[in-house]
Amino acid sequence: MQVTDLVRMANQIAAYFNPYPKAEAIDAIGKHIHMSWEPRMRDQLKAHIDAGGEGLSPLFLEAAAEYYKGPKTPKAKAG
């Protein structure tokens, strides 16, 4: 897929979630990318971000940074 298409789709996702509270938007964007995009699309997007992320919205870049950190493991309960 062309990077320009990925950027366009990514920005459409970010625009859709932009009215949401920021934390909710970031989480929803990450979930959408994980559930709806093929691994090769996610890999291509990651490479584009690593190369500077030209054209991606600030909200999407923030969401992608959280997404590519990996899953958050809940803290174990003491006791």
Image (cartoon, rainbow, N blue to C red):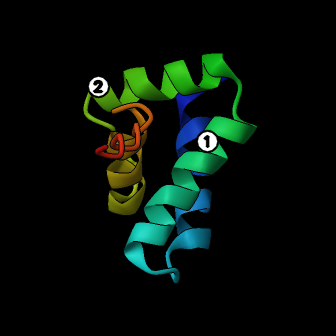
Q: Nearer the viewer, residue 44 or 38?
A: 38
- The numbered mark at residue 50 is 2
Which residue does the image show at 39% across and 20% down from the upper left? 47
Q: Position of residue 18 (x, y in %)?
A: 50, 75
Separation of residues labelled 1 and 2 (CA atoms): 17 Å
- In which image quadrant can residue 39 be found? top right
- The numbered mark at residue 66 is none
Mark 1 Cα within 10 Å, few/some/many (few <14, many 20+)?
A: some
- In which image quadrant can residue 4 be found? top right
Which residue does the image show at 52% across and 80% down from the upper left? 20
Q: Earlier in the sequence, mark 1 or mark 2?
A: 1
Q: Which SS class for mark 1? A: helix
Mark 2: amino acid: Asp
Q: Which SS class for mark 2? A: helix
Q: Nearer the viewer, residue 67 or 5?
A: 67
Q: Nearer the viewer, residue 33 or 75?
A: 75
Q: Position of residue 21 (x, y in %)?
A: 44, 80
Of labels 1 and 2, the one closer to you: 1
Q: Is residue 61 left or right of residue 6?
A: left
Q: Position of residue 28 (x, y in %)?
A: 57, 59
- The numbered mark at residue 33 is 1
Q: Is residue 11 visible?
A: no
Q: Nearer the viewer, residue 76 or 38?
A: 76
Residue placed furthest toward the front: 79
Name the quadrant of the C terminus: top left
